[in-house]
Image (cartoon, grey):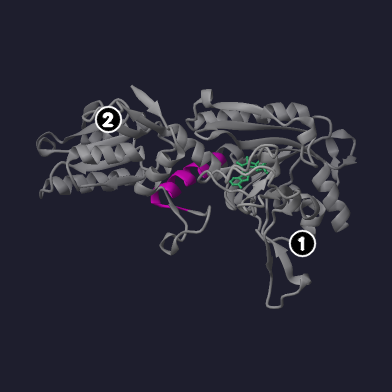
Amino acid sequence: MESNLKSMSDLVSLCKRRGFIFQSSEVYGGLGSCWDYGPLGVELKNNVKNSWWKAMTYREDIEGVDASILMHPKVWKASGHIDGFTDPLIDCKICKSRFREDLIDTAAKCPNCGASDCFTPSREFNLMFKTQMGAVEDDSSEVFLRPETAQGIFVNFLNIQSTMRKKLPFGIAQIGKSFRNEITPGNFIFRTREFEQMEMQYFIKPGVQLEFMDTWKQLRWSWHVSNGLRESRMKWAPHPEDKLAHYADVAVDIEYEFPMGWGEIEGIHSRTDFDLKQHEEYSGKNLHYVDQADGNKKYIPYVVETAAGCDRTVLALLCDAYRVENEGDKEKERTVMKFSPQMAPIKVAVLPLMKKVGLEEVAKKIFQDVQIDYKAEYDVAGSIGKRYRRQDEIGTPFCVTIDYDSLEDQSVTVRNRDTMEQSRIAINQLHNYLKDQLKF
Ligand code: ATP
């Protein structure tokens, strides 16, 4: 018998207890909806980023970039963010809570205090964070923290196309932090004001966008599945035509079923030539592409983008992995994070059965050898049962136990997280065994 995650608070508490995610500035009482990734969280997040980077840039037609977070203020005028990157904000006049008008039913009662007829008229609230650059504080030094990574790619389109001698179709990929002054952040790391995006803009000839939407929809869906997300908890959510962003002609999201309901983890959007056209107009630079394969025709490329949230992908993986087995059975109950081996923060735990000279030396040597290829943990504290339970809770696929017999037969016991089966493996075969089981 196995049950899934029932509430976000169970996950928040596991993440804190086991070193995945902590409240930011916790010793000062925390900073609302800001989170710090602990030792296991940063491993998991790096695994997500590495998997994405490999899938998206280890191919002939996509190049990577790492653009700066602060950009010329005109970028945001051109992109439409200064005038249009707003959410409709309403306040409850009774309890002063703030809401996004489009996310609640304003005809009903205030979700916080229950008052009725209590909302202020809605007003547009810009989500960009403003700051000052340099020592003088005036309008000319005002800059913004980027609210999306995409614009760093658009303004580098020509640099990358020309230096890397790219022909259409080709893409540019980037992972980086974005900032949005969200009205109602929450649900753990689902909606925060500082978050990481993994975006790729694919530049194509105008007219073929639907074809590339299909290609990228398929690739992005399978990427999430290859990381271990259960397809039964994923769905497509097309944007209705009247809800399309100002730059898009078709858009669809991949949603995951979180404990609080369905939520977007990635968007696949056809952005037309909107952004490059705007940057051409505002910068005065020619951003046309000369298509040598089509009689040197000049045009502004269209763009199909894949925009995934790194933190939301991490959250989906954490929610999906969380299982409780034999709930209520004191002897047999265990919480297991069933990460795929690729996503698991720790791949192998090395556990000497007793703290004894001879045994520890062998165990340390095995730990050092395993660490050459895999992130591993060495644990001597507590009973072996307790140590297994800790590894289950952090999702370690394999535990290697060294016992007295190991000194005699030069073998160890390898325990499988999911089946709990134990196999006796010769120490000199351990590397091959792990490689075979972990499949990388
Ligand atoms: P939402 O409708 O949830 O506000 P969005 O449609 O504005 O999201 P995009 O602009 O398409 O999101 O950004 C791409 C991805 O970035 C999203 O799929 C999501 O995974 C991630 N993302 C966006 N906003 C946040 C946030 N405030 N916190 C964490 N991740 C975010």
Is 135 left, or right, of 22 in this rendering?
Answer: right
Main secondary-structure element of the magenta-colored stretch: helix
In primary-sequence order, the first of circles 2 and 1 is: 1
Residue contact at pointers 2 and 1, CB within 8 angstroms: no
**Does 418 appear in magenta?**
no
User: What residue did someone put label 1 on?
Assistant: 73
Is 268 left, or right, of 423 in this rendering?
Answer: right
Work out which quarter of the rendered image holds the N terminus and state it. top left
Q: Which mark is residue 228?
A: none
Residue drawn 65% across and 47% down? Answer: 99
Look at the image and give the residue range highlighted in magenta. 36-52
User: What residue did someone put label 2 on?
Assistant: 333
Badge 1 amino acid: Pro
Q: Which image quadrant is residue 130 in?
A: bottom right
Q: Position of residue 314 (x, y in %)?
A: 50, 41
Image label count: 2
